[in-house]
Amino acid sequence: MATFLLERTAPLPPAEAWRRLTEWQRHGDAVPLTRITVTTDPPTGLGTRFVARTGFGPLAFDDPMEVTVWEPPEDGGPGRCRLEKRGRLVRGWAEIEVRPGPGGRTRVRWQEELTVRLLPSALDTTLERSGRHVFGRAVNRLLRRP
């Protein structure tokens, strides 16, 4: 199992940072070799399900997720979303938080716990570093692009 935490500050109001981070299809543009398919009707909220298909050809796998906490920011306040990963290969959760920061900026916190089936625990540190790198770049891209 690998756990990692990402923290960023963005020059956006909390509601805009939230929108950019929780429009799930946008994650397909931010994470290499990944396509997102939302499997429930809009709007996004508690119970929304989607699948991240990552990989190339026969080396691809599905990472189904469900929104289990949905607390959008209101009136410039904080917001929190929790995703449960329910795949055969990847299990765990991710939490996304946005909150007002200094100077009209938004503080973003992304925490994730991953377990990859069949991956020996000796590789947990490598998985943690890889996750921090891949998701760190994805969060940066999501926050930069309108």
Image: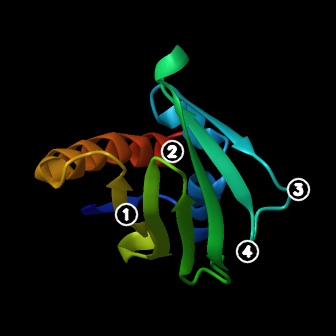
Count of picture labels: 4
Q: Earlier in the sequence, mark 1 or mark 4?
A: 4
Can the viewer see residue 120?
A: yes
Q: Which of disc 4 and disc 3 is earlier in sequence?
A: 3
Assign the C terminus to one quadrant of the image: top right
Q: Secondary structure at mark 4?
A: loop
Compared with 60, 46 (above or below) is: below
- The answer to whether mark 3 and mark 2 are in CB contact below 8 A is no
Q: Find disc 4 in the rendering and name its residue.
A: 46
What kind of element bears circle 3?
A: loop
**What residue type is disc 2 on?**
Leu
Q: Going from the N terminus, do you reach mark 3 or mark 2 first?
A: 3
Residue 92 point in image, percent of width and height: 43, 64
Task: Please identify the quarter of the rendering in which residue 13 is found.
Answer: bottom right
126 horizontally vs 143: left or right: left
Question: What element does badge 2 sit on?
Answer: helix
Name which residue type carries label 3: Asp
Q: Residue furthest top?
A: 57
Secondary structure beneath dot 1 equals strand
Q: Which mark is residue 112?
A: 1
Q: Residue at x 86, y 57 (%)?
A: 42
- The residue pinned by badge 3 equals 41
Q: Is residue 102 left or right of residue 93?
A: left
Q: Is residue 118 above or below residue 115?
A: above
* Cα–Cα gap, marks 3 and 2: 22 Å
- Please give the residue where the numbered disc 2 appears in the rendered image: 142
Residue 140, how many percent across, how many down?
39, 45
